[in-house]
Image (spheres, rainbow, N blue to C red):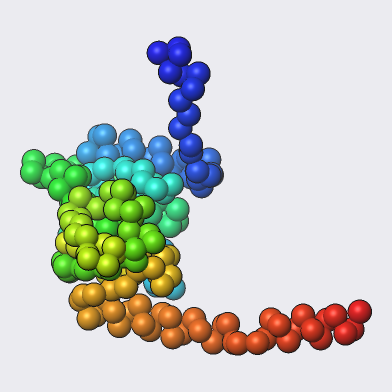
């Protein structure tokens, strides 16, 4: 083991500094262990207002550099995920709860590409020949299936909840990844590309460089 330790290294990316959320993390962890319902003011990503919620905390989950609270939201009457950073106030109540015996985090997260929960879709992505081998070597989702195409490209199929996260994944590959289906995802990618294009007008950078060189 000493020999392995001398040559084996695990790379860890920079993560958020959760020191300033220590009190909130301690509170929610304690409430989850004691099965105590919490009241919290939450600021969701897509809403301006902060909403008071009652939540039964089932799990505290660290994933991809972010800490989440997973539990039954009494406002929505369903199990929801909450980003710890967006909890603006939290108080454990004297109310107790019993988590469902059949609740398992792995089952709850099974269809999420990352953390999103939404309608289920079958998604097909065509990866270019130049990137097919690298993409095919990775495990992106437990539902993925890969099929080699005669031209050297790779057809990836996923069964996932929601399209927003896999849309970002596709866009990260630029022209090396093309959505085959569903059409809704194709349209989402097309819309993002169309709205991004005006930020890169042809010739502007070259024109600015020429103008600056003349000024010098």
Most distant residue in the top direction: 2
Which residue does the image show at 22% across and 65% down from the upper left? 150
Most distant residue in the left direction: 102
Q: Report the quarter where the C terminus lies.
A: bottom right
Classify residue 62 as left or right of residue 10: left
Q: Report the quarter where the N terminus lies.
A: top left
Most distant residue in the front direction: 150
Which residue does the image show at 60% across and 87% down from the upper left? 202
* Percent coordinates x, y for residue 29 in the rendering: 34, 38
* Percent coordinates x, y for residue 49 in the rendering: 42, 71
Q: Please, is residue 59 above or below residue 156 in the view?
A: above
The reply to whether residue 94 is in sight is no
Which residue does the image show at 46% across and 85% down from the upper left? 195
Which residue does the image show at 45% across and 53% down from the upper left? 85
Closer to the camera in the image, 52 or 101: 101
Q: Please, is residue 119 above or below residue 189 in the view?
A: above
Image quadrant in which you'd find residue 51: bottom left
């Amino acid at each position: 083991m000493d020999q392995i330790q001398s040559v084996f290294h695990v790379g860890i990316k920079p993560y958020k500094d959760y020191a300033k959320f220590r009190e909130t993390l301690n509170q929610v962890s304690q409430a989850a262990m004691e099965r105590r319902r919490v009241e919290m003011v939450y600021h969701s990503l897509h809403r301006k207002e902060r909403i008071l919620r009652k939540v039964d905390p089932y799990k505290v989950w660290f994933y991809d550099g972010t800490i989440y609270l997973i539990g039954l939201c009494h406002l929505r009457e369903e199990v929801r995920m909450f980003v710890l950073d967006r909890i603006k106030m939290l108080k454990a109540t004297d109310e107790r709860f019993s988590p469902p015996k059949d609740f398992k985090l792995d089952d709850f997260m099974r269809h999420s590409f990352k953390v999103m929960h939404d309608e289920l879709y079958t998604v097909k992505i065509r990866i270019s020949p130049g990137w097919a081998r690298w993409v095919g070597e990775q495990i992106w989702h437990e539902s993925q299936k890969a099929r080699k195409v005669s031209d050297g490209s790779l057809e990836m199929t996923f069964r996932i909840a929601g399209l927003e996260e896999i849309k970002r994944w596709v866009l990260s590959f630029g022209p090396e990844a093309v959505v085959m289906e569903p059409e809704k995802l194709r349209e989402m990618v097309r819309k993002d590309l169309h709205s991004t294009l005006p930020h890169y007008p042809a010739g502007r950078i070259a024109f600015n460089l020429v103008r600056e060189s003349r000024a010098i």
